[in-house]
Image (cartoon, rainbow, N blue to C red):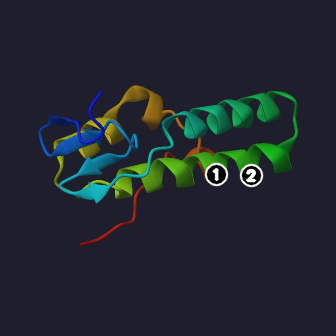
Amino acid sequence: MDADRRLTFGGFSQDLASEQLLCDGEVVARRPREWRIVASAARVHGRQRRRTDAEAARIRSAALVSRLADSLPLDHELRGSFLGHRSVREVPGPRGAGPRSRRRS
């Protein structure tokens, strides 16, 4: 396989050699599994009545979702789709609040 090959879709490209994901030429942070794992940990800790651990996991999960969303332009279709997806909306934030991205441009 040629090291210079890229898969391109819309404004995104995947460098096949480095496995970097780019959006309009900028590297996109990829942590899609971590937020799901941490959200699951928050639910488990909550069921076990480990409130401090559950709250810490909720905060971490919401921060990861926000970081992923913030890696995309505010008006990008993928950002809206990601934040609108049921699995993301269900990420438990502090006191039941969902994740909110605070990035302004």
**What residue is disc 2 on?**
56
Residue at mark 2 to residue at mark 1: CA–CA distance: 6 Å
Task: Look at the numbered disc 2 and give the secondary structure of its residue.
Answer: helix
Image position, residue 13 (x, y; %):
22, 42
> Is 74 in front, or is 27?
27
Residue at 35% of width from left, 56% of height from top? 71
Residue type at mark 1: give it. Answer: Arg
The reply, left or right, for residue 9 in relation to residue 72 is: left
Image quarter of the C terminus:
bottom left
> Is 19 in front, or is 55?
19
Residue at 37% of width from left, 51% of height from top? 69
Look at the numbered discs 2 and 1 and tell me whether their residues touch, using CB distance below 8 Å: yes
Residue at 35% of width from left, 67% of height from top? 103
Q: Using the image, determine if residue 26 lies above or below residue 19.
A: below
Residue at 57% of width from left, 33% of height from top? 36
Mark 2 is surrounded, within 10 Å at the Cα level, by few (under 14), some (14 to 19) or many (20 or more) other residues, namely some
The reply, left or right, for residue 56 in relation to residue 105 is: right
> Is 30 in front, or is 39?
30
Image position, residue 2 (x, y; %):
26, 33
Image position, residue 3 (x, y; %):
30, 39
- Label at residue 60: 1
The reply, left or right, for residue 89 in relation to residue 73 is: right
Instruction: Name the outermost residue toward the left.
Output: 10
Instruction: Name the outermost residue toward the front.
Output: 2
Task: Look at the numbered disc 1 and give the secondary structure of its residue.
Answer: helix
The reply, left or right, for residue 66 in relation to residue 78 is: right
> Is 100 in front, or is 7?
7
